[in-house]
Image: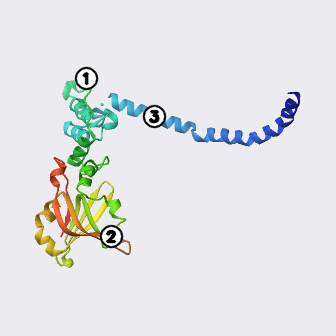
């Protein structure tokens, strides 16, 4: 033991010298990583957001009932209210009265509403905004589409040229250029990406209703991949829009 203690004492200065740069680095990072300016900015943001929650946004920005309902419906107030359904409820009572009652404070018990499901949020996003930053609508249908042997876009991207393929997605773009001699180009979107579909004139004539009107389109065809250009040449189309339920999607159509 005495020998061990003597060795430890002899090594102490060298160990301290090796540790010193590490301590300096830690101290430097601590001083730089969260300076006073950061803490001050965070405190200001926390105070401002708390003030808005307390004094609910309509009075401060002079918003009317229509403005508040539009913001709540599009889920812009989720961070203030917790979820879209709660925001819509609170927005209805957040608009201040006019005239003498304008400065009056509204005091009432907070009503806790059930949080919307992911599917309900996606449907509302499309209804009020036209798109969603949450789950893609096709992701809810993937199990059913897989049973119908429809392949996700990221898997199709790895198919070989000339391989039989099935794709399905929401129609986001329809193009029928005047120089294409009747060919219609369709872009399908699923939870993994997009698929470009080519519809020859003869197929357009046979499946005109599906080509021009489907929101969710299933395509049976042949995969083509040449020089990193990939697309699905349609041989048969099926309108699967009924699977979207009440979801309202719109495509951009160019002629």
Neighbour tally class for label 3: few under 14, some 14-19, many 20 plus, Cα within 10 Å: few
- Where is 151 relative to 8, above or below? below
- Where is 83 relative to 132, above or below? above
Q: Quadrant of residue 73?
A: top left
Neighbour tally class for label 2: few under 14, some 14-19, many 20 plus, Cα within 10 Å: some
Q: Name the residue: 18% across, 50% down.
A: 243
In the rendered view, does 25 fall on the left or right side of 189? right
Depth check: 29 or 17 in front? 17
Q: Which mark is residue 230?
A: 2
Question: Which secondary structure, mark 2?
Answer: strand
Q: Quadrant of residue 102?
A: top left
Q: Which mark is residue 44?
A: 3
Q: Quadrant of residue 88?
A: top left
* Residue 230 visible, this angle: yes
Mark 1 sits on what residue?
Answer: 106
Neighbour tally class for label 1: few under 14, some 14-19, many 20 plus, Cα within 10 Å: few
* Label 2 to label 1: alpha-carbon separation: 59 Å
Depth check: 218 or 62 in front? 218
């Amino acid at each position: 033991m005495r020998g061990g203690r003597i060795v430890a004492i002899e090594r102490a200065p060298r160990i301290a010298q090796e540790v010193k740069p590490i301590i300096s680095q830690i101290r430097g990072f601590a001083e730089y990583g969260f300076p006073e300016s950061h803490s001050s900015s965070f405190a200001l943001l926390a105070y401002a957001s708390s003030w808005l929650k307390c004094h609910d946004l309509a009075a401060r920005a002079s918003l009317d009932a229509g403005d508040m309902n539009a913001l709540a419906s599009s889920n812009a107030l989720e961070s203030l209210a917790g979820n879209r359904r709660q925001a819509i409820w609170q927005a209805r009572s957040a608009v201040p009265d006019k005239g003498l009652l304008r400065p009056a404070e509204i005091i009432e018990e907070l009503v806790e509403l059930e949080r919307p499901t992911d599917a309900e949020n996606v449907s509302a996003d499309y209804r009020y905004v036209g798109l969603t930053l949450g789950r893609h609508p096709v992701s809810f249908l993937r199990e059913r589409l897989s049973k119908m042997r429809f392949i996700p876009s990221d898997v199709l991207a790895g198919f070989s040229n000339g391989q039989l393929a099935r794709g399905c997605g929401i129609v986001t773009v329809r193009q029928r250029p005047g120089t294409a001699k009747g060919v219609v180009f369709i872009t399908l979107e699923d939870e993994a990406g997009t698929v470009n579909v080519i519809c020859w004139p003869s197929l357009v004539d046979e499946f005109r209703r599906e080509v021009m009107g489907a929101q969710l389109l299933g395509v049976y065809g042949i995969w083509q991949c040449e020089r990193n250009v990939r697309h699905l040449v349609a041989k048969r189309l099926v309108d699967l829009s009924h699977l979207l339920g009440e979801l309202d999607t719109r495509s951009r159509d160019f002629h």
